[in-house]
Amino acid sequence: MKVKICGITNWEDAKISCDAGADALGFVTYEKSPRFTSPVEIKKIIKKLPPFVVKTVLFVKAAPEFVNEVMAYTKADIAQIHFEADESFFEKLNCKYLKVVRAKEKKDIDKYAGEYRIVDAYVPEYGGSGKRLALEWFEERDNSKIILAGGLTPENVFEIGSYRFYGVDVSSGVESVPGKKDKRKVMKFIETVKK
């Protein structure tokens, strides 16, 4: 199972995550988030990263032109579109992207079925709140294209082992304070998932 550590705000946290075995790192461009990181900082961190780590940049209510500009400037790999957008929005993107489903009820998890997607718990503040989804929603179904997010921690991530998700995405669950990762939590989280 793939692991993405999201809400990276500094080089130390990026290095800790990579050293622990993270497959992907996420950077947040949403200014209202305590994990907001400017494109200039994101570019600086990405420049230092090892070659086989996927770099994602999260966007909330952004114009496609802004997404294209930031992605080209930072040289990130995937734009994470963390808001409702229509098909014309996606048609204007010049980069690889990942849609996010902010699930309020069970039927929401089938949105974009057939596509790789992040499924997160709906919260007004667009993620990072630690709110969990009901795992029973994912029983007896194919979850191989779902990256599960929302409320995952080193203590509870073992519970998802049998659901065969493509990956997991964690932010607040491995922090000491919002925007700062806790080395031990990051290491324990990744170790648990990879077992």
Image: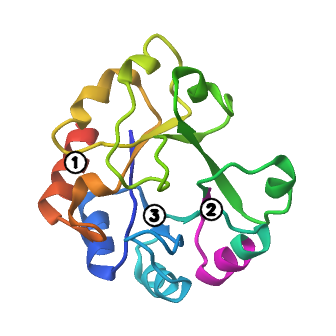
Q: Residues within 10 Å of mark 3 (few under 14, many from 20)?
A: many
Q: Is residue 152 above or below residue 17?
A: above
Q: For the residue labelled by badge 3, is the local secondary structure a helix, a strand or a loop? A: strand
Side of 93 relative to 21 (left or right): right
**Number of the label disc, if any, that sits on residue 79:** 2
Q: Position of residue 13 (x, y in %)?
A: 28, 73
Q: Position of residue 116 (x, y in %)?
A: 61, 39
Q: In this rendered view, identify the residue nearer to me: 62 or 161.
A: 62
Give the mark nearest the N terminus, 3 or 2.
3
Q: Amino acid at mark 2?
A: Ala
Side of 97 relative to 109 (left or right): right
Query: Is disc 3 in contact with disc 1, using a CB cutoff of under 8 Å?
Result: no
Q: For the residue labelled by badge 1, is the local secondary structure a helix, a strand or a loop? A: helix
Q: Is residue 38 magenta?
A: no
Q: Amino acid at mark 3?
A: Gly
Side of 166 relative to 160 (left or right): right
Q: Is residue 71 magenta?
A: yes
Query: Residue tagged by mark 1?
Result: 189
Task: Please give the name of the residue rendered at 55% of the width and 83% of the height, measured from the top-left corner.
Answer: 39
What range of the chain is rendered magenta?
68-80
Q: Amino acid at mark 1?
A: Phe
**Number of the label disc, if any, that sits on residue 26:** 3
Give the mark nearest the N terminus, 1 or 2.
2
**Number of the label disc, if any, that sits on residue 81:** none
Task: Please give the name of the residue rendered at 53% of the width and 34% of the height, measured from the top-left corner.
Answer: 103
